[in-house]
Amino acid sequence: MKHWTTILLIIFASFFNSYSQVSRDYYRLKTGIHFDSKVSGGSYTISELAGIANSYGLDAAIITDHDNMKVSYGISPFQNFLKFSIQENSISKYGIEKYLQEIEQINKVYTNIILIPGVEAVPFYFW
């Protein structure tokens, strides 16, 4: 029994050794994550964020604007017609297609940095 265990461990180790040999061919990228633009309450436009990330020598930047910034308050059981809603800037308000197209266009301008569109999921609140 001990003999089979040793053989299985050798096979298992050789699998991971060969896997690690293949996975050594990768690139390290200096990357910034979680940038909020003016689309969802940040201080800079997406283009300005790309310029800032580029000036810091980043290889990639992940833009993570909020998908939804809406809160509704209502009085039960009348919340369908007696409610108050607040909606701030978000990707859903800006338009997802417009958001993705803007990042795609900026990627064409800043060719030495990769902008990756991301989304920070924010739940819709209703009280």
Image (spheres, rainbow, N blue to C red):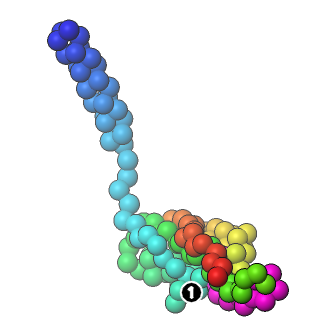
Which residue bears the numbered disc 1?
41
Residue 75 percent coordinates (x, y): 72, 87
The residue sitting at the left extreme is 2
Three-letter code for the amino acid on which mark 1 is drawn: Gly
Q: Which residues are magenta?
A: 79-91
Residue 73 percent coordinates (x, y): 68, 86
37 displayed left or right of 28: right
Q: Within the image, what quadrant is residue 28 found in?
A: bottom left
Question: Does residue 59 sit above or below 66 in this rendering?
Answer: above
Q: Secondary structure at mark 1?
A: loop
Query: Around disc 1, counting alpha carbons within 10 Å, would you say few (fewer than 14), some (14 to 19), or many (20 or more)?
Result: some
Q: Nearer the viewer, residue 125 or 111?
A: 125
Q: Which residue: 73% across, 69% down? A: 97
Q: Which residue: 75% across, 88% down? A: 83
114 displayed left or right of 24: right
Residue 113 appears in the rendering: no
Q: Quadrant of the C terminus?
A: bottom right
Residue 92 percent coordinates (x, y): 70, 75
Residue 61 percent coordinates (x, y): 47, 69
Q: Within the image, what quadrant is residue 5 found in?
A: top left
53 displayed left or right of 80: left
Residue 27 appears in the rendering: yes
Q: Which residue: 40% across, 66% down? A: 31
User: How many callouts does the rendering have?
Assistant: 1
Q: Which residue: 38% across, 60% down? A: 29
Q: Nearer the viewer, residue 2 or 71?
A: 71
Inspect the magenta stretch and tell me whether residue 63 lies in it. Answer: no
Inspect the magenta stretch and tell me whether residue 84 lies in it. Answer: yes
